[in-house]
């Protein structure tokens, strides 16, 4: 568990809002500093952090890089850019549309972009999967990263310098004012509050409504067989997007897993034939439960929470699989 | 030297073209490192390793087969176990120990395989291609018979080599073919044999489902049959079953051995005389 450095709130002389980070602005308005607040930012360390996140290992000064996990990289489950045009929008269909348009995968995890501005992690039902491990990670970003590295990625705990590097990367990718989609009136309120020192609490409250502080996580469990439509009323075109941006992201050419999926009839028939029941070859089961790492096969599939994939999207996916299976 | 430089340059150019856009690459042309005996164009990925154990039993029918030998299950013609490692996504190496069949036993095998080309979906690269170089050495006890190839008068007589170029194409999600020109060299052979032996292999794979496929493989040896009149071409059929991590292959071949040295150069069994055998291989892939 890392210790965070204390510092006093900064007073930021603001001329043009867009040049400043949300954290700086909140501090200028009298807000509390985040638990993981970094007083000094080191861009070279942030670059090391980015390499760790993208490639799973990096060298730094006298430290020789060693893989965090041979099975997963962070980017297998997390995007690094914005996932919605308006970042407070948590609608899974809007997320899918935005990601597809921007050629990004429809991952099971939340984006790292703006994670520095969040205050709670492994929320909702994640305790069902990780039990008491969530306790220390829930309100501490550094501990959440360690939980992810050691357990979610089937890897090892991060060295302190690796953790520091990732925290500096997060700092670099924190939210800027132009991420908040402020109206002209809202900008004026904030500028006024900072420069004239008036209505600062109102401005601070306003800013806090403009971004996500935590993502919910609802584990629905596998859909009851009696409630499954098997894609009968689903939209196969939307399902195709999910298949390409979610399933194929990991399964194409067995990139992450041993199960190879393609957009061919054999893959379609394999998935369609196993659609019933509750074992881990059924789409209904595996999307909602994921799979678990076992000895000799540490790669596993993370589950999609209701917030990340709706039941309607799941039926769309089944509609596409039905089409792929030529049924 | 000039030719070698040209070939290396060509490979480098092809590499740049082939691997620049990996999303277009055709996959699952064959599911395993080997087709049945020959090498496929498949390689392990970087940081993957694989354990393989494979058996070839005795003749299923014919003079040595039938009920008395439980259709060959009483005998082990060859046993191979080995470890393969992915160095990059296109380069792998492997080591194995074979029981051996024919004159040689206690064989150690080491190979390196490099995938030169990978078929693309838009047919800009119509085939996948890999080249495999294999070295064999036997540590069996030397025979006292000076006329035997296992007399091992020199250490080099214990060594043998194989080179195999595999060219494959996936024509359809269910159907793939491969061509496998192969050269085998033995430093010492018997009087009615040749040191260097060319063979051209062909293989086809039909996938019944995502996880079950049928494979056929045949090697035609290009040699003077008046000299090598005791030897046969290797032919086999197999069924493969894929799981998440394991691949099982159940096969029938007339070849007793599993290395190029053996199935190409030393196959003497004849399908038509019932001298074919059941065999299997089990592979398990891990990451490191």
Image (tube, coloured by chain):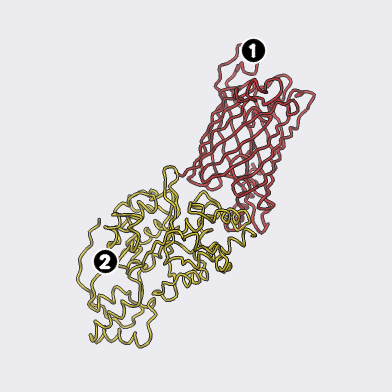
Please give the name of the residue rendered at 67% of the width and 50% of the height, measured from the top-left corner. Answer: B174
Above or below — where is B54 with respect to B228? Answer: below
Please give the name of the residue rendered at 40% of the width and 50% of the height, measured from the top-left corner. Answer: A69
Q: Residues within 10 Å of mark 1 (few under 14, many from 20)?
A: few
Query: What residue is disc 1 on?
Result: B146
Residue A37 marker: 2
Above or below — where is A302 with respect to A207? Answer: above
Residue B172 marker: none
Residue A231's x, y, as percent? 56, 64
Q: Which chain's colour is red? A: B
| Quadrant position of the C terminus of chain A in the picture | bottom right
Q: Residues within 10 Å of mark 2 (few under 14, many from 20)?
A: some
Image quadrant where residue B103 sits: top right
Residue A3's x, y, as percent? 22, 59
Above or below — where is A154 with respect to A39? Answer: above
Image quadrant where residue B64 sits: top right
Element type where label 2 sits in the image: loop
Image quadrant where residue A21 sits: bottom left
Whether labels 2 and 1 belong to a single chain: the reply is no
Horizontal side of residue B56 vs A73, given as left or right: right
Residue A193's x, y, as percent? 26, 85
| Quadrant position of the N terminus of chain A in the picture | bottom left
Q: Which chain's colour is yellow? A: A
For the residue pair B249 and A20, the one nearer the viewer reads as: B249
């Amino acid at each position: 568990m890392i210790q965070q450095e204390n510092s006093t709130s900064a007073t930021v002389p603001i001329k043009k809002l867009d040049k400043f980070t949300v954290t700086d602005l909140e501090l200028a308005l009298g807000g509390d500093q985040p638990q993981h607040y970094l007083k000094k930012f080191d861009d070279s360390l942030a670059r090391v952090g980015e390499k760790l996140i993208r490639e799973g290992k990096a060298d730094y000064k006298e430290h020789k890089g060693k893989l965090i996990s041979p099975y997963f990289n962070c980017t297998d489950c997390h995007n690094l850019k914005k996932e919605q045009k308006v970042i407070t929008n948590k609608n899974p269909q809007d997320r899918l549309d935005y990601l597809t348009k921007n050629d990004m995968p429809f991952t099971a995890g939340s984006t790292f972009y703006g994670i520095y501005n969040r205050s709670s992690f492994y929320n909702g039902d994640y305790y069902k999967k990780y039990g008491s491990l969530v306790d220390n990670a829930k309100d501490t970003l550094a501990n959440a990263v360690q939980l992810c590295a050691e357990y979610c990625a089937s890897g090892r705990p991060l060295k302190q310098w690796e953790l520091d590097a990732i925290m500096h990367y997060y700092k670099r990718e924190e939210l800027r004012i132009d991420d908040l989609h402020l109206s002209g009136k809202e900008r004026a309120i904030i500028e006024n509050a900072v420069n004239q020192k008036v209505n600062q609490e109102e401005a601070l409250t306003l800013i806090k409504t403009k971004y996500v502080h935590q993502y919910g996580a609802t584990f629905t469990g596998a859909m009851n067989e009696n409630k499954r439509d098997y894609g009968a009323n689903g939209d196969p075109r939307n399902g195709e997007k999910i298949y390409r941006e979610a399933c194929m992201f990991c399964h194409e050419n067995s990139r992450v897993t041993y199960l190879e999926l393609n957009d061919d009839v054999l893959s379609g028939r394999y998935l369609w034939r196993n659609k019933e029941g509750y074992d881990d070859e059924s789409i209904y089961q595996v999307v909602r439960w994921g799979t678990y790492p076992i000895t000799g096969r540490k790669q596993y599939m993370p589950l999609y929470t209701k917030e990340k994939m709706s039941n309607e999207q799941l039926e769309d996916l089944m509609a596409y699989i039905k089409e792929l299976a030529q049924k | 030297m000039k030719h070698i430089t040209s070939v290396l340059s060509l490979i480098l150019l092809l590499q740049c073209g082939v691997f620049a856009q990996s999303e277009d690459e055709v996959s699952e042309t064959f599911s395993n490192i080997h087709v049945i005996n020959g090498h496929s164009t498949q390689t392990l990925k970087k940081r993957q390793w694989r354990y393989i154990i494979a058996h070839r039993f005795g003749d299923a029918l014919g003079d040595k087969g039938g009920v008395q030998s439980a259709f060959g299950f009483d005998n082990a013609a060859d046993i191979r176990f080995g470890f393969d490692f992915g160095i990059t996504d296109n380069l792998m190496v492997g080591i194995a120990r074979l029981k051996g069949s024919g004159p040689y036993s206690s064989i150690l095998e080491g190979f390196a395989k490099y995938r030169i080309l990978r078929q693309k979906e838009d047919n800009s690269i119509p085939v996948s291609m890999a080249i495999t170089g294999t070295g064999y050495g036997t540590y069996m006890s030397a025979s006292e018979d000076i006329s035997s190839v296992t007399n091992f008068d020199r250490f080099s007589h214990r060594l043998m080599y194989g080179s195999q170029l595999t060219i494959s194409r996936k024509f359809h999600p269910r159907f793939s073919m491969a061509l496998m020109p192969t050269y085998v060299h033995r430093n010492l052979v018997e009087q009615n044999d040749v040191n260097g032996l060319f063979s051209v292999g062909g293989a086809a794979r039909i996938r019944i489902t995502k996880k079950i496929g049928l494979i056929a493989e045949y090697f035609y040896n290009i040699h003077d049959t008046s000299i090598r009149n005791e030897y046969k071409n290797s032919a086999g059929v197999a069924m493969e079953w894929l799981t998440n991590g394991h691949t099982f292959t159940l096969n029938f071949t007339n070849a007793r051995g599993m290395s190029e040295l053996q199935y190409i150069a030393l196959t003497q069994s004849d399908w038509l005389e019932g001298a074919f055998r059941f065999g299997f291989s089990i592979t398990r892939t891990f990451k490191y």
